[in-house]
Image: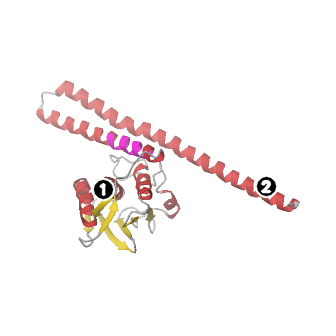
């Protein structure tokens, strides 16, 4: 039989756990409300731009220069919306367990080259220097090629969002024990220490991006962590503080476990 003191301690622990759960639920609901408000605001911007572009086409559609420039506006805004919708759908699929990985042996150096080349154009257009350090050509790992590229491009795009023009971004990979460890490092604005535990939370952003045209809303990094975990790996973020750059590390097993 428990003593009155033990019973009281159990009640206190239960109350503390319940209070902590309530606070976490309130915080999650607040993030969701903030995200929905941000989503509505940010979707309004490209939709307004597209509506204006259509008006310009109706009024000045015969002018070739105006027409080409206006179609460029429409294309960029559609890409923004498509990027956001795809990220949202992927998060939903992962949460529902509806993403199936297609694991196959991959050449690690080739995987890095594909990821870097897919984002090199936009990154260099923003004035950044992208450096890729390739591992030996003989190194391989078991992974889904599409999802691995998604992980790396999300990290590279995130680095670009938070790095000033003229900054540098590094992509490297190495073998540590039975794992492949990917590093994406930048010379950007860094992350405050109190923000580091939250960078992979869905619908969370540390600071406004330096490029407002970039889609995000805290979804891309959440996808990175979830996809890494689906591969049996992990994702982490490191920074020495504001204006000190950031480093994101993804660790995946060389050989599929289980």
Say few, some or many: other residues with alpha carbon within 10 Å of mark 1 (under 14 / 14 to 19 / 20 or more). Answer: some
Q: At 50% from the left edge and 57% from the top edge, which residue is drawn?
A: 198
Which residue has dot 2 on it?
11
Report whether 94 appears left or right of 212: right
Residue 143 shown in magenta: no
Label 2 crowd (10 A; few <14 / some 14-19 / many >=20):
few
Q: What mark, if any, has residue 145 been given in the picture? A: 1
Q: Quadrant of the N terminus?
A: bottom right
- Residue 255 placement: quadrant: bottom left
Residue 166 shows in this picture: no
Q: Residue at x 80, y 60 (%)?
A: 9
Report which quarter residue 245 is drawn in. Answer: bottom left
Give me the residue at 25% from left, 71% from top: 138
Mark 1 or mark 2, whichever is nearer to me: 1
Magenta stretch secondary structure, dominant: helix
| Residue sticking out furthest to the front | 258
The quadrant the C terminus occupies is bottom left
On residue 63, which mark appears?
none
Q: Where is residue 211 shown, x and y percent of the image?
A: 33, 51
- Residue 35: x, y in percent? 48, 43
Q: For numbered disc 1, what is the local secondary structure?
A: helix
Q: Do the numbered discs 1 and 2 sit on residues whose CB atoms are within 8 Å?
A: no
**In this rendering, is residue 243 above or below 157?**
below
């Amino acid at each position: 039989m428990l003593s009155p003191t033990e019973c009281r301690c159990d009640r206190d622990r239960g109350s503390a756990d319940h209070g902590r759960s309530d606070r976490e639920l309130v915080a999650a609901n607040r993030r969701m409300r903030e995200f929905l408000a941000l989503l509505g605001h940010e979707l309004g911007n490209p939709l307004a731009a597209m509506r204006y572009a259509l008006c310009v086409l109706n009024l000045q559609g015969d002018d070739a220069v105006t027409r080409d420039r206006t179609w460029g506006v429409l294309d960029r805004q559609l890409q923004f919306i498509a990027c956001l919708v795809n990220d949202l759908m992927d998060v939903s699929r992962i949460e529902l367990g509806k993403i199936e990985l297609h694991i196959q042996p991959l050449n690690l150096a080739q995987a890095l080259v594909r990821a870097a080349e897919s984002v090199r154009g936009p990154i260099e257009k923003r004035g950044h220097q992208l450096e890729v350090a390739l591992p030996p050509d003989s190194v391989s790992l078991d992974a889904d090629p599409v999802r691995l590229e998604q992980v790396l491009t999300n990290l590279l795009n995130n680095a670009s969002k938070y790095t000033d023009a003229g900054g540098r971004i590094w992509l490297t990979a190495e073998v540590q024990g039975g794992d492949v460890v990917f590093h994406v490092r930048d010379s950007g604005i860094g992350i405050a220490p109190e923000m580091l535990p939250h960078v992979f939370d869905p619908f969370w952003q540390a600071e406004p991006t330096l490029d407002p045209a970039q889609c995000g809303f805290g979804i891309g990094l959440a996808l990175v962590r979830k996809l890494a975990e689906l591969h049996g790996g992990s994702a982490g973020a490191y920074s020495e503080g504001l204006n000190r750059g950031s480093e994101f590390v993804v660790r995946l097993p060389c050989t599929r476990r289980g």
